[in-house]
Each structure stands twice: as structure tokens, then as C-alpha cells.
């Protein structure tokens, strides 16, 4: 109660503005996601790893625009790239090849399985396009996904168990049972269990989709063995394997597929690739992606995928600047920061005798208050969300802006000192809560 009251006292202006905005916008703010408990603080400035709210509070940002700002806020090189493009126009019907070709080259160069690229705007769209290509290629209809994973807002993507609290039913309201029939679930991080589900329906399955780290479900990494098994069983039955790397693209140079040395057929990329502007890309093998090419199909592409903003020049300019700064050395540095944070959280759990431990990889991490290590949907559901939320509120009060479900994201602008201050803040938050 003390920490909640402190939150209310510190963020009165956010509360007032939220309630005023709610008359027009149901979530009370225009951000993509609600998440923060008891209500979101409203931000109006960000620079590097710092953000400020409307009450003037400064925070270390551990949410980076919801997995987006891998180089922090208002990065100068990205801002310059966008500023160079804007006077020439931001959107053409058929843009010159330069920006799109350069961006595509940067993606193809680093993502081992990606030979061709199609730009879109959101991760939902690239996952839908991936599924359509898989269906066109295989002539089959069904999609198998891991229990608890999140792939976007489209009907076919929201069917199934989810750790995201706002989708409680297997068939959420507004989704038809017909769509739900096309979706199967397999257990995350259970190679034998997943193989059994896929084998049993192999002749109907167009695609298997997986997040190499379940992101919205609490930053739970897939094991290499699990991803390898998905690759083996899908290859055996001609099922298209889709890696949803919307979140994991920046965990390593070449994403999770390079880190684990497992090549999917199609890869969804979004969030960080646009350097802070809306951009998504579906990448894949020539064979599959050529279904989008009219010239290779007698003048009429079997699969069409228009995207008005997919070639937006400002977003491509930002994305190129962003990727040019993401070198293998930069990835290694951020990975070691993430490791420092994860080890620090585990050590705090031991020091206080609490079931607190960290998951994640690279710049992605989460703390869990759970009796067993969190490795899948079942163990994740044992996470004590009330304890994590209370700890999250206390951490916000100490100046650490993050999702209230215990997840943290780092950027290239974070430092070792930032990690140490987060760990110090976590201990202070525990003290404030009486531990
Ligand atoms: N895939 C994953 C793994 C995500 O985390 C998200 C969004 O959080 C999406 C897809 C959907 O992306 P978008 O919100 O751009 O549609």
C-alpha cells in the first residue's frame, strides 16, 4: 500500500491526463501497449537511456519503446538520417531502389536464412504474410504455435493459450470458431511434446511458428535443442518453419537463428529494425519469397501483399542507420550487460532467500518470482504476478521505467553503471516492501 500511495503521489499529472484522454482513447494513452500497473506514467521526453514523465520524474528506461529503441531515444545518427530524407519526401509510390536495396542487403547479410525481403509495417502483418506464403506453398491450411506465445493481433494469431493477461480465452471474443479450427498448439521448450503434436497433424500443417524467446510471455528463451527439433520435424514433412524474430532480431548479430545455428524458412522482423520508426520485414528463402514476384510467375504473383507504408523512405533511412551501428562488437557488449543484470538478479534472490530469478538472453531479461525456473508456459504460469507487480511499482518509484510484468530491455546506450544502479534499485525496492 505504501509504495502504491507513493506512486500516486509522484505521478498525479499522469493520472489526470490519462483520465482526460480516456474520453477519446479507450486505453487512455496512444501507446501501443498498456501494461504498466497500477496505471502507466505518461512520458514526454527521452534521450539515450533516460526518459521523463509529465510530472517531471526522470527514469532509467528499461522498456526501450517496447523492444524497439536498441540505440536508445533520440539517437543522433538516426535522427540525421531521417532529417536528410524528409526534405526529399517521405513516401513515394515506387521509390528509387537505393534505400530499400540497402536495407534489404543489411538484413540478408546478417540473417543466415534470409535471401529475399518484403517490407511491411508491423509484426502482425509479416506473420500473416508468412502464413499465407506457407499455405500457398504447401496447399495446406493449419498453423501450429507454441502455447503461451504472442505473434500479433490478427485473428489467427491470437487463438490459443496466452500468458498475456488480456487474452484469457482460447478463442478470444471477436474471433470465429472457423479460424480457431486452423490453429494447433504445441508445448514450448518440449521437443518430444512438440514433435508429437506436429507429427499427428503433419499432413494438414502449412506452418509452424515460434518465438525464439517468448517475449510478451516473460522473456523465456527457447533452447537450441527445441528449435533444432522443430527444424527437423518440419523439414521431414515439408511444413514451413517461421521464426518470429520481431523481438529477438537484436539479441545477436543475425538474430536468434544465427545464435542457435538453426535456419527457418521464413523470418518475421520488426520493432528494432526501424530504428524507432514503424518498419517490418518478412525475409525468407528464394523459393518461398518468389511467390510474391509477378515476373517469376508468368506475370501474376500467386501471393499478393501490398503495404502502403511498407516502403516508407523515412523509416528505411532510420532502419539503415540503426543496423549500420549494430555491429557484432556492439551486440557482444549489450549481451554482457544483459548477463550482468541476470546474474545480479539471481544473486539478489539468493541473498534475500526469495524465489526470485532471471530469464532472457542478450538485451532481453525478466525477473520471475516462481518456485521453479521459468522455462515454459506451465512454469511461467506459476510466477507470482502480484509480487512481481508490487516489486515493479516500488522499482518505478526508485526511478526505473519498465513493463510492470517484471521484464527489462537494454539498449546500446545502457552502461555497466546503469545495470549496477538497477540492481541497487531492486534491493532498495525489496527493502521498501519490507523484505
Ligand atoms: N511478434 C512478437 C514476438 C511480438 O512481440 C509482437 C508485438 O509485441 C508482434 C509479433 C506483433 O507486432 P506488431 O505489434 O508490430 O503487430
Image (cartoon, rainbow, N blue to C red):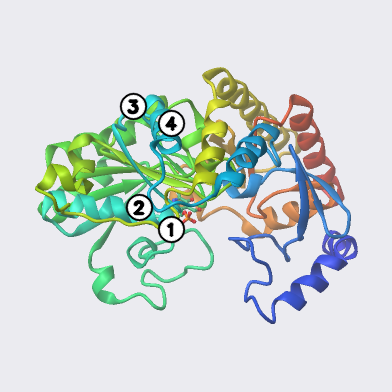
Q: Position of residue 270 (x, y in %)?
A: 47, 45
Q: CA distance from mark 2 to mark 3?
A: 19 Å
Residue at image position (53%, 54%) is 382
Say whether mark 2 is within 8 Å of ligand 1: yes
Q: Is residue 306 visible?
A: yes
Asked if disc 2 and disc 4 are in contact, CB closer than 8 Å, the reply is no
Give the number of the mark in front: 3 or 4: 4
Q: Position of residue 317 (x, y in %)?
A: 54, 38
Q: CA distance from mark 1 to mark 2?
A: 8 Å
Where 76 sits versus 146, above or below?
above
Task: Read off the residue under disc 3.
Answer: 112
Task: Read off the residue under disc 2.
Answer: 127
Give the number of the mark in front: 2 or 4: 4
Residue 292 is left or right of residue 35, and the answer is left
Q: CA distance from mark 4 to mark 1?
A: 27 Å
Asked if disc 3 and disc 1 are in contact, CB closer than 8 Å, the reply is no
Q: Earlier in the sequence, mark 2 or mark 4?
A: 4
Q: Position of residue 203 (x, y in %)?
A: 10, 52
Which class describes the residues within 10 Å of circle 2: few (<14), some (14-19), or many (20+)? many
Q: CA distance from mark 3 to mark 1?
A: 24 Å
Question: In which quadrant is the N terminus drawn?
Answer: bottom right
Asked if disc 1 and disc 2 are in contact, CB closer than 8 Å, the reply is yes
Disc 4 element: helix
Task: Read off the residue under disc 1.
Answer: 152
Q: Which mark is residue 368?
A: none
Q: Is residue 197 visible?
A: no
Q: How many marks?
A: 4
Q: Earlier in the sequence, mark 3 or mark 1?
A: 3
Where 75 sits versus 335, above or below?
below
Q: Position of residue 87 (x, y in %)?
A: 61, 45
Q: Which mark is residue 102?
A: 4
Amino acid at each position: 500500500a505504501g509504495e502504491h500511495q507513493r506512486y500516486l503521489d509522484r505521478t498525479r499529472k499522469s493520472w489526470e491526463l490519462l483520465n482526460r484522454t480516456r474520453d477519446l482513447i479507450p486505453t487512455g494513452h496512444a501507446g501501443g501497449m498498456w501494461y504498466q500497473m497500477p496505471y502507466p506514467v505518461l512520458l514526454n521526453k527521452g534521450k539515450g537511456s533516460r526518459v521523463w514523465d509529465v510530472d517531471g520524474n526522470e527514469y532509467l528506461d528499461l522498456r526501450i519503446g517496447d523492444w524497439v529503441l536498441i540505440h536508445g531515444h533520440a539517437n543522433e545518427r538516426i535522427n540525421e538520417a531521417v532529417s536528410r530524407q524528409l526534405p526529399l519526401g517521405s513516401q513515394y509510390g515506387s521509390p528509387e531502389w537505393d534505400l530499400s536495396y540497402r536495407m534489404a542487403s543489411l538484413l540478408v547479410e546478417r540473417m543466415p536464412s534470409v535471401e529475399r525481403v518484403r517490407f511491411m509495417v508491423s509484426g502482425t502483418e509479416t506473420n500473416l504474410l508468412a502464413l499465407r506464403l506457407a499455405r500457398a506453398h504447401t496447399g495446406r491450411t493449419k498453423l501450429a504455435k507454441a502455447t503461451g506465445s504472442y505473434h500479433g493481433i490478427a485473428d489467427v494469431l491470437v487463438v490459443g493459450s496466452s500468458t498475456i493477461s488480456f487474452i484469457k480465452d482460447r478463442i478470444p471474443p471477436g474471433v470465429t470458431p472457423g479460424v480457431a479450427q486452423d490453429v494447433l498448439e504445441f508445448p514450448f521448450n518440449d521437443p518430444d511434446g512438440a514433435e508429437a503434436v506436429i507429427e499427428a497433424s503433419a499432413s494438414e500443417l502449412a506452418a509452424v511458428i515460434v518465438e525464439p524467446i517468448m517475449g510478451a510471455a516473460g522473456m523465456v528463451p527457447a533452447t537450441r535443442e527445441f528449435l533444432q527439433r522443430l527444424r527437423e520435424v518440419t523439414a521431414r514433412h515439408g511444413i514451413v518453419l517461421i521464426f518470429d524474430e520481431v523481438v529477438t532480431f537484436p539479441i545477436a548479430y543475425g538474430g536468434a537463428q544465427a545464435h542457435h545455428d538453426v535456419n527457418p524458412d521464413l523470418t518475421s522482423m520488426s520493432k528494432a529494425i526501424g530504428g524507432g520508426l514503424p518498419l517490418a520485414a518478412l525475409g525468407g528463402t528464394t523459393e518461398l519469397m518468389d511467390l510474391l514476384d509477378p515476373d517469376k510467375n508468368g506475370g501474376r504473383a500467386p501471393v499478393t501483399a501490398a503495404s502502403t507504408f511498407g516502403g516508407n523512405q523515412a523509416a528505411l533511412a532510420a532502419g539503415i542507420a540503426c543496423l549500420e551501428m549494430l555491429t557484432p562488437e556492439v551486440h557482444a557488449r549489450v549481451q554482457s550487460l544483459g548477463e550482468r543484470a541476470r546474474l545480479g538478479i539471481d544473486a539478489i534472490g539468493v541473498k534475500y532467500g526469495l524465489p526470485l530469478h532471471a530469464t532472457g538472453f542478450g538485451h532481453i531479461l525478466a525477473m520471475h518470482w516462481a518456485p521453479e525456473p521459468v522455462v515454459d508456459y506451465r512454469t511461467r504460469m506459476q510466477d507470482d504476478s502480484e509480487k512481481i507487480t508490487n516489486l515493479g511499482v516500488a522499482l518505478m518509484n526508485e526511478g526505473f521505467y519498465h513493463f510492470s510484468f517484471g521484464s527489462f530491455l537494454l539498449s546500446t546506450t545502457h552502461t555497466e553503471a546503469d545495470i549496477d544502479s538497477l540492481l541497487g534499485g531492486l534491493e532498495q525496492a525489496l527493502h521498501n516492501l519490507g523484505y
